[in-house]
Amino acid sequence: MLMMRCPAVATLLLGVLYGGDLTLPLDAGNIVIRDARFVSDKTEVREVSYTLINQTSSAWRTLKLQFETKADCNVERQMTIPLYVPSNGEWALGDGVTKSYTQFVYKFFSDFNFCRTVEITGVTLIFAENSKVQIDGVTGERVDLEKQQRELDDAERRSTEAQTKKNAIDAARRRQLAAEQKKKDAELNARLAKSRAEREAAAAEEGRKLRANCTVIYQTTIDKKVKDLTVREEQQVRACQVLGLYPPR
């Protein structure tokens, strides 16, 4: 277990080590870390507290920092402690705003069993983001969020326009196919109607001829006895009777 041992100096508070201001250049300004300190109970380091002063012209909604520390324990140790600045509402740190924070850091000291002093020696920016830019403090890469959003909006607009154009082309093609199918159906219906009319006309003509023939047969056989009919006449009479045209109607 980590144990804090303070020098026997009356002006020092038990378990609290004070540091000076730390200045972190950021976006044409500075983030000032003031009064950064480790806070302990009587036996172990529990928290780190600090105050951030935003001297940039931006409101930062995300800040990730890393404190470099030097610990005088049973052996001298140097550590880095990552800190994610809590977001209170939409913005973690507005422009020109001063805020104080306290965070647990016990896990970083849990393996030490004897430390005389722990001090903060520096601070590093890991990540920062506001409404316009995203900064990777490790690689130095800057992402223009407004440009990125414009590109996303442009890509979405182009995609929407392309889909709208495709939908219009598909709709026009469907209309064209429907018109072509309608024309084909009309042509087929016309051919079927013509064929039906031709068949009906042919059937009517055939009926007319049969009635005319049966009328002649009736006229030539009506006055004859059955025994006097020739074989041909008898066949003709029977055929006309089957058709219901003997006698003719």
Image: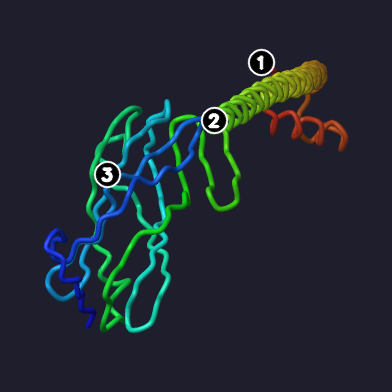
Name the kind of residue labelled 1 in the image: Arg
Residue 149 numbered mark, or none? 2
CB of mark 3 within 8 Å of CB of mark 1? no
Q: Residues within 10 Å of mark 3 (few under 14, many from 20)?
A: some
Question: What's the CA distance linking mark 1 and mark 2?
Answer: 92 Å
Residue 239 visible to the viewer = yes
Nearer to us: label 2 or label 3: 3
Q: Which residue is mark 3?
A: 51
Quadrant in the picture for the N terminus: bottom left
Up-down: is 174 above or below 101?
above
* Sooner in the amino-acid sequence: mark 2 or mark 3: 3
Nearer to us: label 3 or label 1: 3
Q: Which residue is mark 1?
A: 249
Instruction: Pinpoint residue 39: horizontal percent, then vertical percent.
Output: 20, 62
In front here: 81 or 142? Answer: 81
Q: Quadrant of residue 151?
A: top right
Per the image, label 3 sits on a secondary structure element best described as strand
Residue 137 numbered mark, or none? none
Per the image, label 2 sits on a secondary structure element best described as helix
The structure residue drawn at horizontal position 20% and vertical position 75%, both measured from the top left corner, is 5
